[in-house]
Image (cartoon, grey):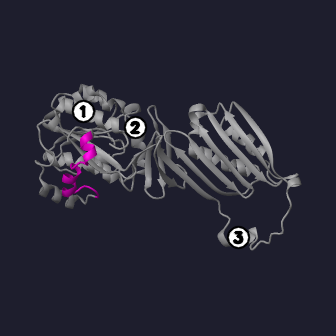
């Protein structure tokens, strides 16, 4: 060969969109494509982006294989660069074409580093490759990243093992990752739902402010919450007689039970009545004045959770609450989902009354921007700060060993930044 390397620029067209959005399958395919061509794999580094797209590179002893995918166009751009004569990049090409199930392709091969244009320099190595491998080890290093992003911002978490759980239900794609910094993580449709490290922030704040304010809740309804964390927190109250939980997607429960046992610890509790079904339909058919507290633990307003942000749903929640009832919902981020945050607040105020809707904020470290809201609506006019019993909450926190919520944080969470007050017309 009269050059230092061979470089193939490939466009795979008409690929399987699910494969192009699956970082684990792509990484495995790229690594194997390098190996079947005779290359020595040194490291892999792959990122998955939300809602779709994967970028990554496999570093080989003979150079690299790189990729970026556009699942929405069934398209992948691949870069195959090999040095010397021991590795044939066309073998990698053929392998990847089958992995991605490409219906068509274009490929351009270039020879890099033409020897007729180069002069070999006298360069003395301080260490041979064998000596370096002996010192640092020849082990293949994996570097995989999950990225939750929109057009302007992103959060990435590193994971280095295979995806622990991956199933596509009739409603959504559910995965469990084992991350380096936050432990096991539940992701739905490539959006972070919870991690072992910070799940208590969310689950305690969506549960305890309402439960403490009510004081004697006996009948609680949870809409969503398939990971089990909200049910776990609510079931800590001895006054409860029954918790009804309605989750549309049994796959979320299955994943959480298998890989998030500390979150899904109360699914067998005798006071929990678990129903697999549509929470929107359940509330529409529920009897009036049935529940002391309703907790809406849904995901972002996409897919099966979209109806949880409708006026009709909240009117039904109001009807189902007892006269002193309280309903709470995750209210999105005023920094990330500003329009949804404001629209939900306005909708609730239109149904419950302006003075009966209260917004709290808390730190959600793996949610976009790290700032998240809970929106609470009271049917009787109870105020979450003025009518709240701090000493009772302090005793509860101590007895239960809570991780995030406490009596001081309860009060502070409802003290909103000026910009948030302006957004919801409370300034």
Q: CA distance from mark 3 to mark 1?
A: 64 Å
Q: Quadrant of residue 398?
A: bottom left
Q: Quadrant of the C terminus?
A: top left
Q: Secondary structure at mark 1?
A: helix
Which residue corresponds to the image point at 46% horizontal and 31% vertical from the top-left? 170
Residue for badge 1: 346
Is 394 positioned to the left or the right of 262 in the image? left
Which class describes the residues within 10 Å of circle 2: few (<14), some (14-19), or many (20+)?
some
Residue at 37% x, 37% y is 300
Real-space CA distance between mark 2 and mark 1, rounded to the nearest whole angstrom: 32 Å
- The residue to which callout 2 is attached is 250
Residue 275 appears anywhere in the view? no
Question: Horizontal and vertical percent for residue 333?
Answer: 34, 43
Q: Secondary structure at mark 3?
A: helix
Picture layout, residue 66 above or below residue 130: above
- Disc 2 vs disc 1: Cβ atoms closer than 8 Å? no
State the image coordinates of residue 23 (x, y, percent, origin top left).
Answer: 57, 45
Residues 118 and 143: in front is: 118
State the extent of the magenta-drawn residues as a range: 403-422
Tag 2 secondary structure? helix
Q: Is residue 66 visible?
A: yes
Is 199 on the left or on the right of 33, as rendered? Answer: left
| Label 3 – label 2 distance at C-alpha | 51 Å
9 sits left or right of 317 in the view: right
**Residue carrying label 3:** 132
| Identity of the residue drawn at 67% across and 50% down | 31
């Amino acid at each position: 060969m009269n050059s230092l390397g061979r470089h193939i620029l490939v466009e795979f067209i008409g690929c399987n969109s699910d494969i192009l959005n699956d970082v684990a399958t792509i990484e495995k395919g790229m690594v194997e494509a390098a190996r079947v061509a005779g290359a020595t794999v040194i490291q892999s580094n792959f990122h998955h982006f939300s809602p779709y797209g994967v970028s990554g590179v496999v570093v080989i002893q003979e150079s690299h294989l790189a990729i970026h995918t556009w699942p929405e166009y069934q398209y992948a751009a691949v870069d195959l660069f090999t040095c010397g004569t021991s590795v044939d990049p066309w073998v990698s090409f053929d392998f990847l074409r089958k992995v991605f199930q490409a219906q068509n392709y274009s490929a351009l091969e270039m020879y890099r580093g033409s020897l007729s244009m180069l002069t070999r320099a006298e360069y003395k190595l301080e260490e041979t490759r064998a000596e370096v491998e002996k010192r640092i080890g020849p082990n293949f290093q994996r570097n995989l990243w999950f990225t939750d992003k929109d057009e302007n911002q992103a959060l990435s978490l590193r994971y280095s093992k295979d995806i622990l759980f991956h199933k596509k239900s009739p409603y959504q794609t559910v995965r469990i990752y084992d991350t380096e910094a936050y432990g096991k993580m539940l992701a739905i449709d490539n959006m972070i739902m919870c991690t072992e490290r910070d799940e208590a922030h969310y689950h305690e704040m969506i549960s305890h402010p309402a439960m403490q304010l009510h004081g004697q809740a006996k009948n609680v309804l949870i809409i969503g919450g398939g990971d089990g964390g909200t049910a776990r927190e609510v079931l800590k109250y001895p006054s409860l007689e029954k918790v009804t939980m309605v989750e549309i997607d049994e796959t979320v429960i299955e994943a959480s039970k298998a890989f998030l046992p500390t979150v899904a610890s109360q699914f067998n509790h005798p006071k929990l009545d678990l129903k697999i079904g549509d929470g929107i339909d359940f509330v529409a058919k529920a009897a009036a004045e049935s529940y002391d507290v309703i907790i809406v633990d849904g995901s972002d307003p996409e897919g099966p959770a979209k109806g949880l942000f409708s006026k009709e749903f909240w009117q039904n929640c109001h009807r189902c609450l007892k006269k002193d009832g309280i309903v709470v919902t995750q209210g999105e981020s005023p920094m990330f989902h500003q329009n949804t945050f404001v629209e939900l607040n306005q909708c609730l105020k239109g149904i419950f009354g302006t003075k009966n809707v209260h917004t709290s904020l808390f730190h959600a470290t793996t949610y976009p921007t790290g700032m998240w809201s809970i929106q609470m609506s009271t049917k009787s006019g109870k105020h979450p700060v003025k009518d709240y019993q701090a000493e009772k909450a302090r005793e509860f926190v101590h007895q239960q060993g809570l991780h995030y919520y406490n009596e001081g944080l309860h009060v502070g969470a409802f003290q909103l930044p000026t910009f948030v007050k302006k957004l919801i017309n409370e300034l």
